[in-house]
Image (cartoon, rainbow, N blue to C red):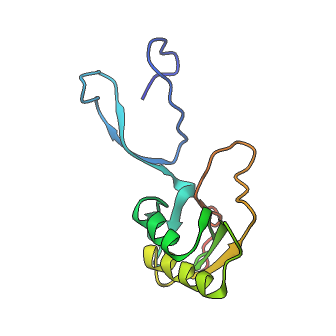
């Protein structure tokens, strides 16, 4: 963590609400506070049907599992409802119905079996003009909760 007017320290950009752990001082001995366990933005957390939040990373084992099912090139997961996920999938060729069903089942196994998952095949994922690839986008986090 650097001060606003620090001239000899790097400035890293984080938003209020980013998920991290604050240390009172850096392990190297720097007297100022430090961030550890940087996990991402709150907007990148899935809200599970039971109300808990969960970080979902599309990498490593998850990527291997998806590639074993279909020729996936890009994926973005959108939480569109309390129990609804849409996976935008860009693939090397049109996906079959069976592949879509298996990808949906894979995503449920990696997140929660209580989610309804829709696979939306797209020519390419539109990451927006900023170029930041947010693989998970929670579109309901700021929406009021239903009773």
Above or below, comparing residue 105 to residue 145 in the picture: below
Q: Residue at x 52, y 21 (%)?
A: 4
Above or below, comparing residue 9 to residue 135 in the picture: above
- Whether residue 80 is visible: no
- Whether residue 54 is visible: yes
Q: Residue at x 56, y 80 (%)?
A: 104
Front residue of 138/22: it is 138
Along the horizontal axis of the image, is 2 left or right of 71?
A: left
The image quadrant that residue 37 belongs to is top left
Q: Residue at x 52, y 54 (%)?
A: 42
**In the rendered image, which quarter contains the N terminus?**
top left
Front residue of 11/117: it is 117
Q: Which percent across, then down, holds residue 112?
A: 46, 78
Front residue of 81/100: it is 100
Front residue of 143/40: it is 40
Q: Residue at x 72, y 60 (%)?
A: 124
Above or below, comparing residue 124 to residue 130 in the picture: below
Q: Which percent across, then down, holds residue 68?
A: 48, 73
**In the rendered image, which quarter contains the C terminus?**
bottom right
Question: What is the count of numbered marks?
Answer: 0
The image quadrant that residue 31 belongs to is top left
Q: Which percent across, then down, holds residue 89?
A: 65, 68
Q: Which percent across, then down, holds residue 13?
A: 54, 33
């Amino acid at each position: 963590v650097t001060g606003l007017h620090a001239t000899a320290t790097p400035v890293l950009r984080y938003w209020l609400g980013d998920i991290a752990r604050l240390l009172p001082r850096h392990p190297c001995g720097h007297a100022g506070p430090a961030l550890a366990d940087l996990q991402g933005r709150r907007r990148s957390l899935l809200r599970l049907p039971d109300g808990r939040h969960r970080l979902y990373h599309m990498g490593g084992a998850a990527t291997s599992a998806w590639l074993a099912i279909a020729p996936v090139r890009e994926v973005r997961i959108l939480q569109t409802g309390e129990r609804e996920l849409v996976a935008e999938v860009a693939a090397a060729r049109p996906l079959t119905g069976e592949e879509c069903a298996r990808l949906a089942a894979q995503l449920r196994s990696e997140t929660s079996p209580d989610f309804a998952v829709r696979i939306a095949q797209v020519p390419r994922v539109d990451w927006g003009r900023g170029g930041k690839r947010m693989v998970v986008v929670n579109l309901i986090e700021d929406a009021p909760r239903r009773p």
